[in-house]
Amino acid sequence: MTDREGIEYHHELTLFWIMTRLNKGEWGMSKQKTLGELKRSGYRPLSVKAEMRKNLIQKMLDRETLFPGIFGFEETVIPELQNAILAGQDMIFLGERGQAKTRLIRSLTSLLDPWVPYVEGSEINDDPLIPISRYAQELIAKHGDETPIAWLPREDRYGEKLATPDVTTPELLGEVDPIKVAEGRYLSDELVIHYGLVPRTNRGIFCINELPDLSEKLQVGLFNIMQERDVQIRGFRVRMPLDICVVASANPEDYTNRGRIITPLKDRYGAQLRTHYPKHIGVEIDIMDAERSSLLDGDGYTLTIPAFMKEIIAETTALAREHADINQRSGVSVRMSIANYESMISNALRRTLLLREDEVVPRISDLPAILPSSSGKIELETVEEGKERQLVEELIKRAVQKVFSRYSKPEEFTTFLQNFSNGHSLEVSDTMPTAMYTQHVRNLPGLSATLERLAAGGSPGMIAAAMEFILEGLHLNKKLNKKVVEGEISYWG
């Protein structure tokens, strides 16, 4: 390569890098302060849906993770969402509680440009080249290219409202501002209008959570905005081409069965996306690890969580989603797994503090600590005093048995079970020091191979957790008897 060719090649790479940054909106146009400067910069307006589409395409070409923190939707919801964005459609997300609907909707802002210009002072974020409000039009007519320009970050281009029956038209659409009328303006003047949440989210994404709870009157106003672009406020018919991506969430039962959404509004949503709970235990565990409280990491102790304990927490929730006595229309949220995970770790931490140990390792005797965090997360089909606690205890036992069957078979413990002949027993508890478990292992032959597999690393805490797991698994497989007295658990043959 000649020197000239090298210079040209370097120039092409530099130009490509600059254009990439400009296309992503990372820098370059944020310095313009007036309309004239903005025009000279080469700025071209895009609709919000075209902008989202452009950035989605770029992220897909760059192989970027589209929605970090969203697990289990890669093969189901995400492809449908990509199609809806590429088609420029408004969307409604249907799913039971705790299926990441709101989080997924909020993450759509990552597909907006980092900054967009708007006419400074505009309540509805008027595009400087396509102003739609009376205020922006008059300001540009007066100042021309000297019209001041401000820049709106993507975080401020998202609006959200939880739909309830008492949501009013002024909140959502707007109202006549009596102060502006008192200042001498006529009621027929568009400038007397104080815009609501939807117009103020112009050039952004607006979400209505629990859409079926919105009154029919406001639903009519919403589908006017989505298609006819009419905003009617106190008799005014303000024709305003708002640029909004309208997104909503709803429970499937409310949306499809109760008739609480008017048909014309249903018809205006381009895509209906159905969310779901994790289809695999591994996905549920990923969510638990990502969402559990960070406070549990900041105490200066070594936190080690056995894989089988994570699986037991996840399986408890999965089994609850199939139980006939639990209201499945209401759903069993992933929040149950997260809360139970935190409660289990907290109980293990409490033991570590009481015993002055230095390692936090959850074990089977910590599982009763998840009863309070589980009880509020399920709704029973019938109301019966004390039934929730019994049901959760049943779910825990079934989960332990199911996970134990993945790791071991009762036939592997023939030698170990001989230790319980002649009435011998073994006691454990959630406050027993871990050193005692190590002593039990030395005195009871037949566990070394299984413990080596379960207690990865071989720390005293992991040995204790693995030993309790084995004892409980053998009990649930009817190989050992069990008795619980004031927190002390006895196993015998």
Image (spheres, rainbow, N blue to C red):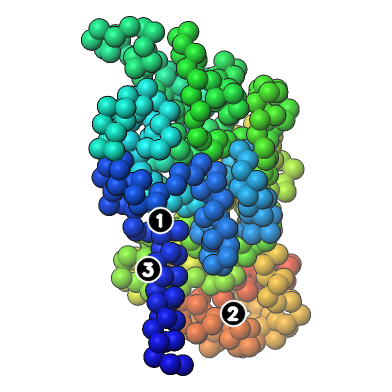
Query: Which residue is at the front of the view, 19 or 205?
Result: 19
- Mark 3 or mark 2, which has the lower sequence index? 3
Specify few, some or many for label 3: CA neighbours under 10 Å numbering under 14, 14-19, or 20 or more. many
Residue on which the image places disc 2 = 454
Residue designated by label 3: 352
Give coordinates of residue 80: x percent, y percent: 68, 50
Which of the two labelled residues, at mark 1 and mark 2, occupies the earlier sequence position? Answer: 1
Q: Secondary structure at mark 3?
A: helix
Say what amino acid the circle numbered 2 marks.
Leu
Q: Quadrant of residue 283?
A: bottom right
Residue 172: in sight, yes or no?
yes
* Quadrant housing residue 22: bottom left
Characterize the local packing of mark 2: few (<14), some (14-19) or many (20 or more) Cα atoms within 10 angstroms: many
Please identify the quarter of the rendering in which residue 432 is found: bottom left
Q: Amino acid at mark 1?
A: Gly
Relative height, residue 30 to residue 257 (above, below) = below
Q: Position of residue 176 (x, y in %)?
A: 37, 12
Residue 483, labelled with which disc? none
Q: Residue furthest bottom?
A: 1
Amino acid bearing label 3: Thr
Which secondary structure lies at badge 2? helix
Q: Is residue 200 visible?
A: no
- Residue at x 59%, y 19% (from the top left corner): 220
Residue drawn at point x = 67 percent, y = 70 percent: 404
- Asked if the residue at tag 2 contacts the one at tag 1, i.e. Cβ–Cβ closer than 8 Å, the answer is no
Name which residue lies at 29% across and 9% down. Answer: 185
Between marks 3 and 1, how big is the CA–CA gap? 50 Å
Pair 1/2: label in front? 1
Q: Estimate how packed mark 1 is, as few (under 14), some (14 to 19) or many (20 or more) residues with alpha carbons within 10 Å.
A: some
In three-dimensional space, the C-alpha distance between marks 1 and 2, rounded to whole angstroms, equals 50 Å
Q: Which residue is mark 1?
A: 25
